Image: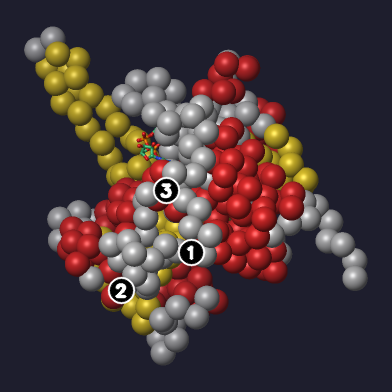
Amino acid sequence: MSIPQSIPATLIPGDGIGSEITTAVVEILDALGKPFAWEIQQGGVAAIEESGDPLPLTLLDSIRRTRLALKGPLATPVGGGFRSVNVRLREEFKLYANLRPARTLISGGRYEDIDIVLVRENLEGLYVGFEHYIPIDGDPHAVAISSGVNTRAGSRRIAEFAFDYALKHARKKVTIVHKANVLKALTGMFLDTAYEVAKKYEGKVAADDRIVDACAMQLVLKPWQFDVILTTNLFGDILSDEIAGLVGGLGMAPGANIGVDAAIFEAVHGSAPDIAGKGIANPLALLLAAAMMLDHVERHDAAKNLRAAIDGTLRIDGVRTGDLGGTATTRDITQAILRRL
Ligand code: NAD
């Protein structure tokens, strides 16, 4: 049997806990036979310190070449400062689909048997950040205005992605989440377009819809009614954190940004500055993102082995980091997973 070749991929360690969790993930992937040949590139605050630019050209060139990246969290200043590097990467590589699966891996939490996939439109909506102030009476920031932008083409593209995903992964239903009762143009068009796409899948994938506030409540009351959720950029941002909370928090939530020109895999969580450098960060969200990346490059066996090792480590060995109620360090959980591989 031939040994599969390592696939060139860009690795961005990121800020805060980024280097701690990427080190763990690389070590574990190495034990799976080095599926990726890494090009290591700095981005975010780490890159500013190195080159003065949070999104250096060398990083962009690397992703242009590899079209595949694993990204640690990148810090973004609140209010002023530079624009989110995460958002710029999504725009640069037209990463229009944000895929965030959440599955219960640890029993005994608040909810058992959660298995929800959130598909978030990643380039449009209120997230475009078209904002300005109107000065009045000497106050330069007297009025703040933000415009959301949804396009028919963008809505259709993400809806097709969600229904295709549902079909391919034997999912039964897509729930379209919107606020069409108030944002009638912006999210009404998204809803109408998604239902148009749903017609093509009739008999194969069911479709229904929820207003975002009701969806947020129902996720807490009865999350099992949801299968695939399809929603706009800002609602997806908020609901994906809520859904991560159902399965044990941000330390368990992976994400993929998939587009025309590239695919970038990451954890849903940020750089966790409060625990950075302490060696206690949970690497599982980034590791689960690496499993999604293995599936993306059709290395399904390696992805399956990796998920099984994570399952065993949590459920049977009971090795858990602090965010999951345990006392294990990043190193402990890395070693435990390596033992299972
Ligand atoms: P955060 O996700 O970094 O942290 C929220 C809380 O969760 C903190 O208490 C943190 O300690 C904990 N936490 C997060 N990840 C963890 C892990 N792997 N293991 C254990 N605990 C973990 O959110 P924040 O504090 O709002 O943001 C910090 C920075 O990260 C900001 O600059 C923000 O812009 C950035 N951010 C980046 C991304 C990304 O790169 N995709 C996503 C979200 C936030």
Q: How crowded is mark 3: few (under 14 residues within 10 Å), some or many (20 or more)?
A: few
Choose between 77 and 316: the one closer to the eye: 316
Q: Quadrant of ligand 1?
A: top left
Judge whether 62 appears above or below 235 on screen: above
Location of the N terminus by quadrant is bottom right
Q: In this view, does 276 lie above or below 246?
A: above
Q: Can residue 215 be seen in this snapshot?
A: no
Residue 93: quarter of image: top right
Whichever of callouts 2 and 1 sits on the residue coming sooner in the sequence is: 2
Cα–Cα gap, marks 2 and 3: 26 Å
Give residue 332's position: percent from left, percent from top.
57, 44
* x then y, percent, for residue 4: 83, 61
Q: Dot 1 lies on which element?
A: helix
| Mark 1 neighbour class, 10 Å CA radius: few under 14, some 14 to 19, many 20 or more | some
Q: Which colour scheme is used?
A: secondary structure
Q: What residue type is labelled 1?
A: Arg
For disc 3, the marked residue is 326
Residue furthest left as drawn: 137
Q: What residue type is labelled 2?
A: Trp
Residue 224 is tagged as 2
Left/right placement of residue 321 relative to residue 36 reads left
Q: Name the residue under label 1.
A: 315
Residue shown at the point (67%, 55%) measured from the top left: 339
Frontmost of labels 2 and 1 is 1
Q: How many marks?
A: 3
Q: Earlier in the sequence, mark 3 or mark 1?
A: 1
Query: What is the spatial separation of the Cα atoms under label 2 and label 1, in whole angstroms?
Result: 21 Å
Q: Which residue is drawn at 69% across and 59% down?
A: 341
Which badge, 2 or 3, comes first in the chain's sequence?
Answer: 2
Q: Residue at x 41, y 81 (%)?
A: 172
What numbered label is drawn on residue 101? none
